[in-house]
Every structure is written in C-alpha cells, then in structure tokens.
Image (spheres, helix red, strand yellow):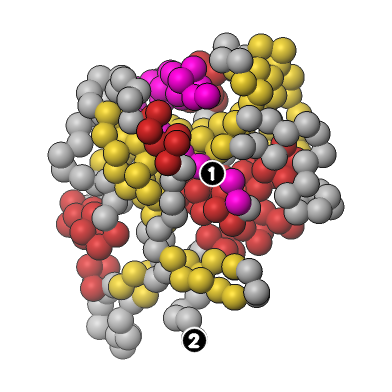
C-alpha cells in the first residue's frame, strides 16, 4: 500500500492524457520528426527559432508547437512554462502527434552540488523528480521539520497493469556521449543528476538535504518530469541545463547539440 497522496509524475501524466487527441497512444497524426526540443520559455527557444528553416506553428489545447528543420534535422519545439504539469502535458501532446526519435529538455537551473558554478553546463547522467515526500506522523502543535521527511518513489505504470517504483529516470546513452563534448557557456561541461520539482528551494540546509538524499546536482521545474514522461511513452531523452544561465545560453547549447547529433 502506498503512502499518503502527493503530487506525482503519474498524476501529471494522466492529466496530460486527458487533453490529448483521440488518436491511438503513440500514433503520430503527421510525419514523425527527429527531435522534440522542450524549454521553459521563449527566451530559451529564441536562438533555435531564429535558425528554424521552413518553420510553421500549430496549437494544441493550450500549447504551441513550432515545426521545421534545424541543422538538417526535422524538429518540433515547445514551451513548457517551467512547470511539471504543463511540461508533461506538452511533452505528451508532442510525442503522440509528432512521434520524435529523441526528446531534449533544456534551460537554466539552480545548483544543488556546491562544486557547480554559474555558466557550467550540466548534462543529464540521469534525472530525478524529488517532489515525492512522506512526513513522519506528528500531532497538531508538534511542528514540522522537512529534513526528517523521507523519499517517496514514483509508481510508474508498466506492462501487465503493474506499478514499478522508481526514484530516477534514464538518459539516452548516444545523446549523452554527444552532449558531454559540448562547450559550456562560461564554465565546464560535466554530467550530473538533473532534479526537478514544483519547488523553489532557497534554504541552504534543505538544498543540502535534497542533494544528499536524492543525489541531485541541480534543480529546475520540469526536466525530470519530461524524462519520466518520455520513459513512459518509450522515447529516449537527454537534458541540458546551464547553471544560473543567462539569456540565450541554454538555447545556444541546444543548437550546438542539434548540430552535433546524428
């Protein structure tokens, strides 16, 4: 029996399915594309949109998708608003309609690993959605201490109508081998664990606790949830995050990846 109900990737995924077209799961209603590129805002998308050839846009529910050719590959770009629910809905819509061969999530992030510096490029070695937590039983008036909470895994729907408990989501090995060679905007390029949650953690002790318990290198609002969605739908994924990224830096990194990806 699972613990208390918390916001979960599975819940986000179900919500996303509710707004999808009625086409069979996994079936593209247009020609499949090579890559889906997902970023939080127009700021990150702009360097790619400026280079997009034969571009046009489509709208599905509340989400906009830009299609065209980038670095010789067919692509679809979408804005996720940096929120787990929006990100999973947009990713699910895009995967079902455009059937990409690879999902790339990119944007800025905040460091959890104290060794990271602004301008470092963090490439996903794996992803974790650290929003699952269980608190100890405590009577009214007993206070609250988030450093005593325990991790709660995501229960992914798997074949045979089974649930599989997972704490992390994998990355595509081929894409990782390419991404780790990309130049960082202002620092180093290193692999790490991209963490995400609908949280903005600014307490040093809590950041240190999440880093220790979940192994996170960084924090953003969406990357792990996009990765979990891609895993559920059987599409490879890679994450590119610039620590405290300035305007346009993450988009430039994604463009470099597209030029290197075969």
Residue 83 visible:
no
Local crowd size for mark 2, using a 10 Å CA cut-off: few (<14), some (14–19), many (≥20) = few
The correct choice, above or below, for 68 with respect to 216 in the image is above
Q: Position of residue 197 (x, y in %)?
A: 42, 53
Q: Position of residue 73 (x, y in %)?
A: 62, 21
Foreground residue among 152 and 53: 53
The residue where tag 2 is placed is 1
| Marks 2 & 1, CB-CB < 8 Å contact | no
Specify the segment rendered in magenta.
Answer: 234-262
Q: Position of residue 96 (x, y in %)?
A: 72, 45
Picture residue at 37% right of the left edge, 49% below the top: 126
Q: Nearer the viewer, mark 2 or mark 1?
A: 1
Local crowd size for mark 1, using a 10 Å CA cut-off: few (<14), some (14–19), many (≥20) = many
Mark 2–mark 1 distance (CA, rounded to whole Å)? 31 Å
The correct choice, above or below, for 78 with respect to 131 in the image is above
Residue 101 visible:
yes
Is 239 one of the magenta-colored residues?
yes
Q: Secondary structure at mark 1?
A: loop
Position of 209 with respect to 200 (left or right) is left
- The part of the image, by quadrant, that contains residue 208 is bottom left
Picture residue at 80% right of the left edge, 34% below the top: 30
Picture residue at 50% right of the left edge, 75% below the top: 5
- The part of the image, by quadrant, that contains residue 162 is bottom right
Sequence-first disc among 2 and 1: 2
- The part of the image, by quadrant, that contains residue 132 is bottom left
Picture residue at 44% right of the left edge, 81% below the top: 3
The residue where tag 1 is placed is 236
Position of 137 with respect to 10 (left or right) is left
Q: Secondary structure at mark 2?
A: loop
The correct choice, above or below, for 123 with respect to 113 in the image is above
């Amino acid at each position: 029996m699972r613990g208390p109900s918390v916001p979960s990737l599975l819940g986000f995924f179900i919500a996303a399915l509710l707004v999808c077209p009625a086409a069979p799961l996994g079936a593209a209603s247009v020609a499949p594309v090579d890559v889906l590129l997902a970023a939080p805002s127009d700021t990150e998308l702009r360097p790619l949109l400026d280079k997009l050839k034969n571009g046009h846009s489509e709208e599905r529910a509340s989400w906009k998708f830009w299609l065209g050719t980038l670095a010789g590959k067919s692509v679809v770009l979408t804005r996720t608003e940096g929120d787990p629910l929006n990100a999973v809905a947009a990713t699910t819509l895009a995967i079902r309609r455009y059937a990409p061969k690879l999902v790339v999530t990119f944007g800025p992030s905040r460091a959890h690993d104290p060794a990271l510096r602004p301008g470092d490029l963090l490439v996903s070695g794996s992803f974790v959605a650290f929003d699952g937590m269980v608190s100890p039983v405590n009577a009214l008036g007993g206070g609250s201490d988030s450093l005593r909470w325990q991790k709660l895994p995501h229960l992914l729907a798997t074949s045979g109508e089974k649930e599989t408990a997972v704490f992390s989501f994998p990355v595509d090995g081929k894409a990782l081998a390419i991404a780790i060679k990309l130049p960082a905007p202002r620092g180093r390029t290193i692999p790490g664990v991209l963490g995400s949650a609908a949280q903005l953690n600014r307490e040093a002790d809590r950041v240190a606790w999440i880093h220790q318990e979940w192994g996170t290198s960084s924090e953003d609002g969406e990357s792990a949830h996009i990765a979990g969605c891609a895993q559920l739908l059987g599409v490879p994924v890679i994450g590119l995050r610039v620590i405290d990224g300035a305007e346009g830096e993450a988009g430039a990194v994604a463009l470099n990846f597209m030029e290197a990806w075969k």
